[in-house]
Amino acid sequence: MILRLFLFAALMLLSVFAPVWILAACALAYALRFTAYELLVLAACIDAYYGGSSALPYYTLVTAALLLAVEYIKSRLIVYNETK
């Protein structure tokens, strides 16, 4: 639980200070490791912080699609099934 909180705090810092592609790779790894519904909250915060000029919440929509895809393929990944 402490590791999960630490990694989420690191993702929050990355969302402000790192390029988007680094954040996306780390968020994907986080979603593969945990059931990462809190990423939707982080994506909504990013949309609120950076997305004042766009009409659609792109980060939230992409994160929701990522979470749905990851939850769908998690059971089909051999590496995931061997470690659990």
Image (spheres, helix red, strand yellow):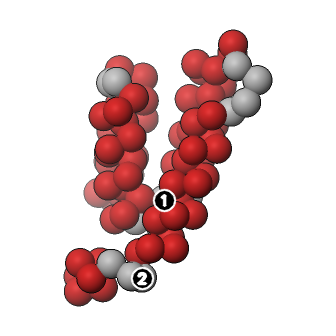
Q: Vertical placement of 36 versus 14: above or below? A: below
Nearest the viewer among 65 and 29 is 65
- Disc count in the image? 2
Three-letter code, disc 2? Ser
Element under label 2?
loop
List the residue tagged with mark 1: 36
Q: Give the residue displayed 23% in from the left and 86% down from the top.
A: 82
Residue farthest to the right, as pictured: 55
Alpha carbon separation for disc pair 2 and 1: 15 Å
Q: What residue is pinned by disc 2?
A: 75
Q: Nearer the viewer, residue 28 or 7?
A: 28
- In this image, 17 relative to 51: left or right? left
Find residue 14 and report its horizontal and vertical position in percent: 35, 30
Residue 38 shows in the view: no
Marks 2 and 1: which is nearer the front? 2
Q: Residues within 10 Å of mark 2 (few under 14, many from 20)?
A: few
Residue 56 x, y percent position in the rendering: 73, 30
For marks 2 and 1, the one nearer the N-term is 1
Q: Is residue 73 visible?
A: yes
Seen at 58% across and 36% down, the residue is 59
